[in-house]
Every structure is written in structure tokens, then in C-alpha cells.
Image (cartoon, rainbow, N blue to C red):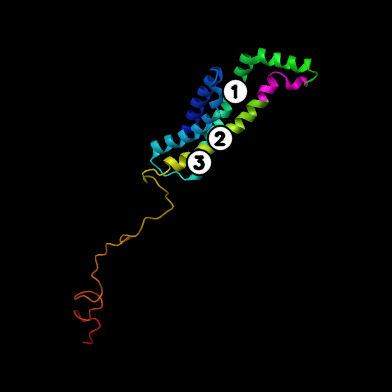
């Protein structure tokens, strides 16, 4: 769920960035930030350890949400905002003798670039998820891997048995009747 919310927030920032001049060059960093933020929000809410595989999956979900919302909202908005500029550029190409097929002009071109953008968003957010798992993936250990058994009771030292060869301990030869020949 964190991935979908992050994807929606990043696409809104991306749309704002595409309208403001000079900010659009930073739009490629937003999907990476989405992947990192998705891992952060997941570890904040669950306190679980996130390995790189899980971080990549969280980043991919955030990137897919970014790409899908960009395709649904961003591509039509881009077409309507920039259609006059696109038509002027196509007219310049026709004046230079370059004729594009009718299927590549207008809205179809915007959809093709929207699909390519969705794939790029997913790839960059996956990279961001890997980075996020390296930064925030430690967790607190609560809710860790259920397939790993806990360590034995005396793991790491702290034995309560006296060392061998001490009176009353194992191997002392004295005390009790076991092994004394009586």
C-alpha cells in the first residue's frame, strides 16, 4: 500500500515539475526517490528487516504506480497542454521535407512515450528500492524472518556449568557413586 501512495505523490510532483520551467530536468530523480520512500515507509510501519529483493519489489510497485498514473493522467494532460507546440514542431518537420506517418503524430505519440515512461519509472524506482533497502533495511528485528529458528539458550557463551576438572564439576573423579567402582 505504501508503494501506491508513494507512486501517487511522486506523479503529482512530476506533473508539477513538468509545468515549472527548469524543474523538469529533475523528474528522473523522482522515481528513484519513490523507491527509497516506499522502503522507508514500509520499514517505519512494520519494523521488519527488508532485504534487497524486498526493497526492489517495493520500488517496482511504487514505480509501476508512478508509471500507470503518468500514463493515465500525465500523458493526456501533456497532450492538451503541449498540443500547440507539438503541431508547430510537426509543421517545421513537414517544411523541411520530413513527413511523419499520421499514426505517429498527436495523441498516439504521447501514449507511446507514456508507455516508455512507465517502463523507465519502474526501472528507476526498482533501483531506488535497492538503495532504500541498503539505507533503511535493517529494521528493529521485530517480525523478522519466521523461517529462521531462534538460537539455542546458551548461544554465545554464558554457560552455567563449571569448567571440567574443578571439584564437583564434570571430570573431577570425585563426588557421587557414578564411576567410582563402589
Chain-order first, disc 3 or disc 2 = 2
The residue beneath circle 2 is 124
Instruction: Identify whether 155 is placed above or below 123.
Output: below
Is 10 on the left-hand or right-hand side of 182? Answer: right
51, 135: nearer the viewer: 135
**Residue 66: quadrant of the picture:** top right
77, 61: nearer the viewer: 77
Q: CA distance from mark 3 to mark 1?
A: 27 Å
By secondary structure, the bulk of the magenta-drawn segment is best described as helix
- How far from the left and from the top, in percent, is residue 143? 39, 45
Question: Which numbered tag is attached to residue 72?
Answer: 1
- How far from the left and from the top, in percent, is residue 101? 78, 21
Q: Which residue shows up at 75% across the image and 18% down it?
A: 93
Callout 3 environment at 10 Å: few (<14), some (14 to 19), or many (20+)?
many
51, 92: nearer the viewer: 92
The residue beneath circle 3 is 130
Label 2: which secondary element: helix
Q: Which residues are magenta?
A: 101-111
The quadrant the C terminus occupies is bottom left
Label 1: which secondary element: helix
Does any portion of residue 1 appear in the rendered image? no
Amino acid at each position: 500500500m505504501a508503494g501506491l501512495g508513494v507512486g501517487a505523490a511522486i506523479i503529482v510532483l512530476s506533473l508539477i515539475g513538468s509545468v515549472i520551467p527548469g524543474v523538469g530536468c529533475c523528474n528522473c530523480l523522482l522515481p528513484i526517490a519513490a523507491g527509497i520512500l516506499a522502503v522507508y515507509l514500509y520499514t517505519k510501519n512494520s519494523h521488519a528487516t527488508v532485504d534487497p529483493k524486498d526493497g526492489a519489489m517495493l520500488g517496482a510497485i511504487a514505480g509501476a504506480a508512478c508509471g500507470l498514473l503518468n500514463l493515465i493522467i500525465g500523458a493526456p494532460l501533456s497532450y492538451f497542454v503541449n498540443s500547440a507546440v507539438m503541431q508547430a514542431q510537426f509543421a517545421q518537420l513537414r517544411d523541411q521535407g520530413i513527413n511523419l506517418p499520421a499514426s505517429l503524430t498527436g495523441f498516439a505519440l504521447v501514449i507511446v512515450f507514456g508507455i516508455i515512461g512507465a517502463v523507465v519509472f519502474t526501472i528507476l524506482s526498482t533501483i531506488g528500492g535497492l538503495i532504500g533497502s541498503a539505507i533503511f533495511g535493517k529494521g528493529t528485528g521485530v517480525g523478522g524472518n519466521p523461517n529462521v529458528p531462534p538460537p539455542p539458550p546458551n548461544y554465545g557463551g554464558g554457560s552455567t556449568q563449571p569448567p571440567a576438572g574443578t571439584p564437583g564439576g564434570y571430570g573431577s573423579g570425585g563426588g557421587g557413586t557414578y564411576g567410582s567402582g563402589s
